[in-house]
Each structure stands twice: as C-alpha cells, then as structure tokens.
Image (cartoon, grey):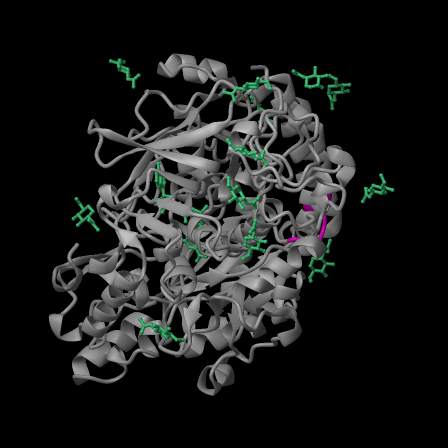
Amino acid sequence: MSQRAQSLLLYTLFLVPAALCWAGERNLRDLHEQHLKARTIVSDPTQLSQTYDFIIAGGGTAGLVLASRLSEDSNHTVLVLEAGDTGDSVISSILVPEYAFTHSLLQTSYDWGYNTLPQPYAGNRALYWPRGKVLGGSSAVNGMYLVRPSHIEYDTWANLMQSQDGGLDADAWSWNGHYPYMKKTETYSPPVPSVQSVINIDYNLDFHGSDGPLHASYPGYVLPVVGDWIPTLQNLGVPEAPDQAGGQTWGSFVATSAINPNNWTRSYSRAAYIDPLPPRSNLDILVNATVTKILFDSNMTATGVQFGIVKGGPVTTINARKEVILAAGAIGSPNILMHSGVGPKDVLTAAGVPVLLDLEGVGQHLQDHISSSLVWQTTAATMGSQYAAGAANGVPNGQSSPFLSFINSATCYANSSILMGSYDNAVSLQQTVLGLLNSSMANFTSQDPGVLEGFKALYLANAQDFLTSSVGQVEFLLFANGDFTPGNQQTISIQFALQHPFSQGRLYITTNDTFDSPSLDPRCLSHIADVTLMRQAVKFARQIAATPPLSTVLGTELSPGPAITADADIDAFVANGIQTEFHPANTLAMLPQNQGGVVDARLKVYGLANVRVIDASIFPVQFAAHMQWPVYSLAEAGAEIIRTYYNGVPDPFDPNGSTGSNNNSTNHNNNGTNTKSGGAPSASAPSVFTSAIALLFAALVVVL
Ligand SMILES: Cc1cc2nc3c(=O)[nH]c(=O)nc-3n(C[C@H](O)[C@H](O)[C@H](O)COP(=O)(O)OP(=O)(O)OC[C@H]3O[C@@H](n4cnc5c(N)ncnc54)[C@H](O)[C@@H]3O)c2cc1C
Ligand SMILES: *[C@@H]1O[C@H](CO)[C@@H](O)[C@H](O)[C@H]1NC(C)=O
Ligand SMILES: *[C@@H]1O[C@H](CO)[C@@H](O)[C@H](O)[C@H]1NC(C)=O
Ligand SMILES: *[C@@H]1O[C@H](CO)[C@@H](O)[C@H](O)[C@H]1NC(C)=O
Ligand SMILES: *[C@@H]1O[C@H](CO)[C@@H](O)[C@H](O)[C@H]1NC(C)=O
Ligand SMILES: *[C@@H]1O[C@H](CO)[C@@H](O)[C@H](O)[C@H]1NC(C)=O
Ligand SMILES: *[C@@H]1O[C@H](CO)[C@@H](O)[C@H](O)[C@H]1NC(C)=O
Ligand SMILES: *[C@@H]1O[C@H](CO)[C@@H](O)[C@H](O)[C@H]1NC(C)=O
Ligand SMILES: *[C@@H]1O[C@H](CO)[C@@H](O)[C@H](O)[C@H]1NC(C)=O
Ligand SMILES: *[C@@H]1O[C@H](CO)[C@@H](O)[C@H](O)[C@H]1NC(C)=O
Ligand SMILES: *[C@@H]1O[C@H](CO)[C@@H](O)[C@H](O)[C@H]1NC(C)=O
Ligand SMILES: *[C@@H]1O[C@H](CO)[C@@H](O)[C@H](O)[C@H]1NC(C)=O
Ligand SMILES: *[C@@H]1O[C@H](CO)[C@@H](O)[C@H](O)[C@H]1NC(C)=O
C-alpha cells in the first residue's frame, strides 16, 4: 500500500462521536485477551528461558510467520523479541479495516515514526516513514492490500543470484520456485455477492491457496464508484489484469485485501499465524523488548542477543543454540546488524561501534515507492459521505461490520509504454537510463567495488528486465475515502506511486545506541528517469479522471489544480508533494558476495555462521506490488529452509547440499567455501493507548 494511504494527506480533523464506536469493540478485546493467555506471549523477561534454539528479532510480519512455523517442530525452542507492545489495548484500531484510516495507529506509540534525512530532490523535505511497532509489525497498521509481484520480477531476482552457486540455490527465488510459498500463506475467499455485483472480480481459484493462515479476500462493502475503475482504464486502452495472483500483475484490477471475511476483521501476522495456535511450550514471545545487539564468539558464530526495555536501561542476554534470525524490518534489521559490529567499516567507526565484520553492503540500496496524488471534487458516494449519512440517520450502514471493512483496493499497474505514450518512447527512456549507468555508479552512496558491482547489476536488471517490459512502472490507486466532516465537499483522489525507482540510497547509524533511529537517505528523485516517470504519471492520472465512466462523477481538480500543466510545474508539484507508499526495502540485499550482497540464497549473512535475515530487507529489487505478500511468502520459504536443514531433510532446492545433522552452533565454524549448503551455518570469510479512548477523542484522519 500503500496506500491506501498515501498519504497521509492529513487533511481533515474530525471528531469521532462516541456513539459511533463499534459495538464489537469489547468483544474483540475480550477475545484477544483470552487468546493471549493461551499463547506464550509474556511481558516479564524473568519468565524466559536462558537459551533457545532460535531467537527471532522482531515480531512483525515476517517474524510471527517464522515463530509459528519454526515452533511447529516441537524439538525446537523459539523466542521472539518484539520492541512494540501487544496491541491489545488498541485492538479495534488494528482489527476494524476502516479504522486504519479513521482511527489510525500512525503517529502513536505503535508507530516507529521515522523521518528520512532532508531529501534534496524532494523540496529538501524530511519524509515521514511510519512502521508498525506492535506484535504483527507493519501488517497490523498497513492498508491491507494483498498483491503479488510478477513472475518477471521473481525471475529477475533468481537471475541476479545465478552467478553464485551455479544458480542452484537461486531457483528458490524464481517465480516457479517461490510460487508454492505464496499459495501456502493464504486462504482465499471470493467476494460476497453484493460486492461481486459491483466489482465483478475475475478470479481464478487455481492461483490461490485454500488452507493457509492468512485471509485473502475483499471488504464486505464497496462504494459504487469502485465499479467504475476497470471500465475507465479499459476505455483508455489498459486491459483488466487476469487474477494477478498468477503472476501477470499488470493492468487494472480490484486487489485482494488481508481481510477475514468471517467477521470482517484485518488478517495480519498475529491474527493469522499466532492467535489460532494451540498452546506451545516451545514458543515464547516477549513484547516491549528491543534487541540491541547480536553477541558473537570469536568464530563469528552468534551465541545470543541482548535486549533492553528502554533507552539507557539495563540489557538482558539470552543465548541462541542454533541461530539468530533478524526479522526487524527494512530499517530495524540493518540497525541491529550495524550495532552488532557488522556493516561498513567507516560507518561503524564513525558511530563508535567496534567493527567485528566489515560488510560493506549493509544498509545500501535503500529504495521506496514514492507516491503522490491528484484530488477532484466528486458527486459520487465516498466513505465520508456514507459515514456522515450514517451519523445523521442514527444507525445505518455506518456501524455495520461489513461497512466498516471497506478499504480502497482498485488499482492499476501501468507499464512504461502506457506512461511514455508509446513503446518507442519507452525504449528511448531506456537508452537514456543505460547511458547514465556510469554517472549513476559514480554518484552512488557506496564506492566499495563489490557494492558498486551489485548496484550495477541491479540497475541493469531494472533497465533491461523491467523498464520496457509489461511490468508496471507506476501504480495508480483509486482513493475514495472522501471527507468525514458532514456537509463538506466530497473528494476522490487518484494516487500514483513509482514502482521501480532508479534512485537508490542507504541507511546508516550515527550513534552507538540501537534505540536511536538510523539516518535514512533514500535519495528520492535523484535519478532523472524517476522524475520523468512521475511527471508522466501525473498526466496519465488526469487522463484517467477525464475518461468515462469515472469522469462522469468527478468535478474540478482541487490539487494540484488545472493551472499546473507545464512540465516544470508538474515536476515541482511532484518534488514538493511526494510521500512514502510505505515500501522501504532492499537494505540487506540478497546478492552474490562479490557484488556486495549481505545475505546468500539461503538468507544467511555472509561471514556470519548462523545469522539469517528474513524480512523486507533482503529483496534485491523493488517489486511492482505492495510489500506484505512477498514478505509473508518469503518468511514461509525461509522457515522451510531452516526446518529442512535442522531436521536432516534434504533441501528441496539443493539436493546435494548438506543438512543440519550437525546442529551444534559451536561447530559452525567453516568459512563459507560451502556456499551451496542448505543454509548450513557457514561463516564465509569476511574481510574480516488505551483502546476505546482512542475512539473518544479527536482523531487525526490519516488518509491511507
Ligand atoms: C502505514 C503502512 C501501510 C502499508 N500498506 C500496505 C498495504 O496496504 N499492503 C502491503 O502489502 N504492504 C503495505 N505496507 C508495507 C508492509 O506492511 C511492510 O512492507 C511489511 O509488513 C514489512 O514486513 P517486515 O516483516 O519486513 O517488517 P515489519 O512488519 O515492520 O516488522 C518488523 C518488526 O520488528 C520490530 N522491531 C524493529 N526493531 C526491533 C528491535 N531492535 N528489536 C525488536 N523488535 C524490533 C518492529 O516493531 C516490528 O514489529 C504498509 C506499511 C505501512 C507502514
Ligand atoms: C474472526 O473469525 C475467525 C474465524 O475465521 C476467528 O478465528 C477469529 O477469532 C475471529 N476474530 C475475532 C476478533 O472475532
Ligand atoms: C509495554 O510497555 C508499555 C509502555 O510502557 C506498557 O504500557 C505496556 O503495559 C507494556 N506491555 C506489556 C504487555 O507489559
Ligand atoms: C524434529 O521435529 C520434526 C517435525 O516434528 C521432525 O521431522 C524431525 O525429525 C525432528 N528432529 C529430530 C532430530 O527429532
Ligand atoms: C573456532 O574455530 C576453530 C577452528 O575450527 C576451533 O578450533 C575453535 O574451537 C573455534 N572456537 C570457538 C569459540 O568455537
Ligand atoms: C562506462 O564506463 C566503462 C568503464 O569504466 C566504459 O567502458 C563505458 O564505455 C562507459 N559507458 C558509458 C556509457 O560512458
Ligand atoms: C550525478 O551527480 C551529478 C552531480 O550532482 C549530477 O549532475 C548528475 O545528474 C548525476 N547523475 C545521475 C545519473 O543521477
Ligand atoms: C503495455 O501495456 C499496453 C496495454 O496493455 C500493451 O498494449 C503494451 O503491449 C504493453 N507494453 C509492453 C512492453 O508490454
Ligand atoms: C557509546 O558512546 C558513548 C560516548 O559517545 C560512550 O560513553 C558509551 O560508553 C558508548 N556505549 C557503548 C555501549 O559502547
Ligand atoms: C540437536 O541436538 C540436540 C542435543 O544437542 C538433540 O537432542 C536433537 O535431537 C538434535 N536435533 C537435530 C535436528 O539434530
Ligand atoms: C548432485 O551431485 C551429483 C553427484 O555429485 C551430480 O551428478 C548432480 O548433478 C548434482 N545435482 C545437482 C542438482 O547439482
Ligand atoms: C554437539 O555438542 C555436544 C557437546 O557440546 C557433543 O557431545 C555432540 O557430539 C555434538 N553433536 C554433534 C552432532 O556435533
Ligand atoms: C576458507 O577455507 C578454505 C578451505 O579450508 C581455504 O582454502 C580458504 O583460504 C579459507 N578462506 C579464508 C578467507 O579463510
């Protein structure tokens, strides 16, 4: 999503009348508290064991998938350390889909609330980057879009790893290799008839899972205007995508959402993977616990982690028998790694952190989908107008759980031929991009020869595999939340977000305290191709708005307004308006070691015997997709890699690889010559609020 959000166009302040509190609020909370008691979610560090087989840093999207899957093996003990709270006291903000907009947890203590460094090409603004800080992580606060990356993007990922290991391991990350894990995550439910009659979803059950933990479905109510989306794009020559879960992800469609249609609640990693479990004595989950560093022996074997509760407070050490797994997200995981002494030598030295392993790729390749929107007056019903009508009439629609499950989900991934006006124009842009390779390398945030090789590989993949292919370059989203203040003019927005940026940056630490935010520098819009594509996106969004049937319900363009038509003015609007689409990633990229990669094809950090990273950090490329589905399926695949290894089962992707019959972490001292081993621990030689209350006071309408 993103966004559904886009934006946090914080454009309205409104009072949520207490009377509108959802009647299900109390029941939801009771239910969750019961679940908690059945689970081993603990709040007191003294309840922990001293040693676990696996310690997972971060109980977010990926972290709770891993916790659930790894603890299915009763002979493994698993600990999750999560910096945020349980979320129980704000559970309705998490579970009621529409509350993601109207009672958002963004900018509360459940949000890390990062800010980037001022971005020189984006009006020198520091961009707000929210991340969930709660059990479930960002899956608890996101916009619930569930879309898969395309088969082209997965195959590019696998190709990027072919030069390593003869490509054997890398097949796991191709579309065909990874597809089973995408399906394994989900239970798909088609739309209910009243919704299907509006959106007419072209779904294909063959592409979907039917017994996975995560619910992939649709809201229980849709606004009529959503039904205008696909016909409008068709009238512009952009066909409807077949069910995008099959890997052809371009074109227009109404996306699946992470919604449980049994009770119209958010399906997120905790509700999907943890709450339904029977009690497991081999799984502990500690909240309010911030991992501050990984501890290593002299052979770069992780022996455990330290965590603290508050900045400046005492830290506790817990031992890991087998592995430490980082799942703290694209910002949190590199932060922990660098504070553990693993990262670019100059960064660590400047921050006052002793260097254990100079790993130059850590924190590099930081990318995000940048996003903006155009706003029109509308005569169509919006969530705001429907909600206000509910308030005025006493009870209607406005409180039913199907109604409150509405979230935006009409989307379109447009390729560069569409954006540039023709395929020839797209090829011309590609030539420009290829001609800028050397200059882009010279400008990159690392000049380490290995990392630069990786940058080059990623840049060429982006230019050659994506830029002139059918893969979406820009995502367009219909956003119909409107204005919740009764009587106000209703609006509809079209959001647009760049999917494959050529701009790349980095994140890095500047202090020796893990509680401090790292410096985030994505260098948004630093590459001219990104400026060009965003300019074309503004023009295409206007074409969408001017095309029937959507055009028949839209009035005056309110933002940026009809006066902004010259390219320079559009560019300035984009530069001064972009926000995050909430998809920062790529900071611990899976790439070959000689290309400055951080993890190998088995998700293991190069040079460390038994540390893996399994979260949005490791994707080498950005996808034309929202980020959570790829994270869920990555975590499913990662859990299987780990379990097969430790259970002595042959690795499905590497029949000749070794297994974990040796499960003693202290014996994990080989130096990485066996890079193909199924994740065999092998240190490759390095160069060394209170619930309802939130509903009672004036809330910021965060427009997701
Ligand atoms: C507002 C918003 C809207 C979004 N909308 C969508 C959408 O609609 N669809 C979609 O597909 N994607 C969306 N995304 C993106 C998607 O949710 C994330 O990319 C994805 O969930 C990331 O998963 P993760 O496991 O990498 O990290 P997270 O889910 O963020 O998990 C990381 C966890 O680690 C914890 N942590 C961090 N540091 C430490 C530490 N030192 N010690 C212990 N714990 C730590 C965090 O508190 C967090 O719980 C959105 C994201 C946001 C923030
Ligand atoms: C929602 O329904 C599922 C069954 O599909 C159930 O397991 C879950 O507990 C319910 N959640 C809430 C909050 O009622
Ligand atoms: C986590 O910390 C917060 C803030 O100190 C506190 O209010 C909350 O009760 C803690 N959660 C648990 C489960 O102890
Ligand atoms: C551990 O448990 C898994 C699944 O229960 C099983 O397949 C595996 O053989 C077990 N390993 C050992 C060493 O007992
Ligand atoms: C590190 O590896 C060496 C060589 O294999 C071994 O002799 C030594 O015991 C190991 N040290 C530790 C702490 O495991
Ligand atoms: C880029 O640099 C390489 C070697 O440094 C050179 O061979 C190549 O011609 C350069 N390409 C361009 C487009 O300048
Ligand atoms: C590299 O940086 C220079 C100087 O800032 C700038 O003029 C040039 O456009 C940049 N090149 C690319 C490809 O971004
Ligand atoms: C881009 O999309 C349009 C519309 O579907 C299609 O006609 C065109 O062939 C696509 N371009 C590429 C390169 O796939
Ligand atoms: C961090 O740095 C400060 C000084 O900058 C120093 O006093 C402190 O001891 C350091 N902490 C650690 C854990 O190294
Ligand atoms: C791992 O070692 C422990 C004892 O050290 C043993 O009980 C267990 O069965 C082993 N598991 C595997 C998968 O080898
Ligand atoms: C596994 O090893 C055997 C014998 O060494 C070899 O013939 C076979 O090709 C290998 N398989 C793969 C997938 O590399
Ligand atoms: C694991 O370590 C224990 C003692 O540390 C040792 O007795 C056992 O043989 C080791 N197992 C393997 C498979 O190396
Ligand atoms: C890793 O081990 C291999 C085989 O023992 C050895 O040839 C190589 O020099 C070692 N590499 C490093 C960097 O220690």
In the picture, which quadrant includes the N terminus? Answer: bottom left
Q: In the shown orientation, is residue 3 left or right of residue 595?
A: left
On the question of residue 373 being in view, the answer is yes
- Residue 360 sits in which quadrant? top right
Q: Which residues are magenta?
A: 464-471
* Residue 210 vs residue 90, the one in the foreground: 210
Verify whether residue 177 appears in magenta. Answer: no
Residue 406 screen position, x and y as percent: 37, 72
Q: Position of residue 298 (x, y in %)?
A: 49, 18
Q: Is residue 606 left or right of residue 308?
A: right
Quick one: quadrant of the C terminus? bottom left
Q: Where 478 falls versus 553 (above or below)?
A: above
Please tell me whether residue 193 is drawn above or below residue 264 in the rendered image.
below
- Residue 235 vertical placement versus 155 (above, below): below
The x, y position of residue 663, in whole percent, is 56, 38
Snapshot quadrant of residue 557: bottom left
User: Which sits in the foreground, 413 or 175?
Assistant: 175
Of residue 272 and residue 19, the one placed in the foreground of this image is 272
Left or right: residue 658 compared with residue 327: right
Q: Main secondary structure of the magenta part?
A: loop
Q: Which residue sits at x=56%, y=23%?
A: 444
Residue drawn 67% across the image and 24% down it: 594
Name the spot of residue 510 as percent of width and height, x first. Answer: 35, 20
Please give left or right for residue 430 compared with residue 12 in the image: right
**Rendered residue at 37%/46% (across/down):** 80
Which of 44 and 200 lies nearest the eye of the viewer?
A: 44
Quarter of the image where ligand 11 sits: top right
